[in-house]
Image (tube, grey):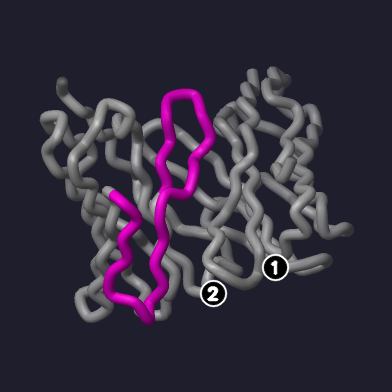
Amino acid sequence: EAQVTQNPRYLITVTGKKLTVTCSQNMNHEYMSWYRQDPGLGLRQIYYSMNVEVTDKGDVPEGYKVSRKEKRNFPLILESPSPNQTSLYFCASSLQAGSYGYTFGSGTRLTVV
Amino acid sequence: GENVEQHPSTLSVQEGDSAVIKCTYSDSASNYFPWYKQELGKRPQLIIDIRSNVGEKKDQRIAVTLNKTAKHFSLHITETQPEDSAVYFCAASKGGGADGLTFGKGTHLIIQP
């Protein structure tokens, strides 16, 4: 089944404890991106990647890192999480060509206390 | 960077009536405009998209129109049904999706029986 898989689905952590949210797609998509969703603010882009080893900042990159060493994986790293990073996070991927749009993962609900 | 404004934030219509959601974007270089539907507790799902070389696109009860001069695009849903109740997001991209998506803040569509 074609899908974008995020793990974990839920995570509660403490301030300052490094964490990684994984994202993997099995559709051979070139484009991948991360978003955070907060009430009243909609979806805001954190980072995006056009292909392996090509990443760039979105609108809210502060406090986050990403890597794209393989085409299928695009992990989101929080080196020192803070409470203002409590949010619902979505990974998404898309084909380079055509009008297929982005397919979203199921989301990761992160709480930083 | 790109800025996408979406109106209204909440829209209540009678079942069977039409619903229209409007978005404006700021960057004239944007060339790809998708619409996503998000049901409560679910991931966003693409419902329709349009590229800048097209003025209108239809898919059954859903249509999107684009006015490049005014930097404005709209979602039209006809013959609304209870299952259309959800939050709808418009988005824009400069690179045909390669640079990810900049989203509007969303419209909560309520279909009254």
* The furthest residue to the front: B60
Quarter of the view holding residue B18: top left
- The range drawn in magenta is B36-60
The location of residue B54, given as percent across then percent down, is 34, 77
Residue at image coords 38%, 77%: B52
Q: Nearer the viewer, residue A66 or B68?
A: B68
Can residue A79 be spotted in the picture? Answer: no
Q: Nearer the viewer, residue A54 or B41?
A: B41
Can residue A32 be spotted in the picture? Answer: yes
Q: Is residue B58 magenta?
A: yes
The location of residue B15, given as percent across then percent down, is 15, 29
Q: Is residue B4 left or right of residue B32?
A: left
Residue at image coords 16%, 23%: B112
- Which quadrant would the C terminus of chain A be assigned to in this image? top right
Q: Amino acid at mark 1?
A: Met
Q: Is residue A69 magenta?
A: no
Q: Is residue B50 left or right of residue A96?
A: left
Task: Characterize the local packing of mark 2: few (<14), some (14-19) or many (20 or more) Cα atoms within 10 angstroms.
Answer: some
Q: Is residue A32 left or right of residue B72?
A: right
The location of residue A8, given as percent across then percent down, is 75, 27
> Tag 2, which secondary structure?
loop
Q: Are marks 1 and 2 on the same chain?
A: no
The location of residue A50, given as percent across then percent down, is 70, 68
> Tag 1, which secondary structure?
strand
* The furthest residue to the right: A69
Residue wearing tag 1: A50
Whether A31 is drawn above or below B36: the answer is below
Residue wearing tag 2: B95
**Answer yes or no: do the residues labelled 1 and 2 have beta carbons within 8 Å?**
yes
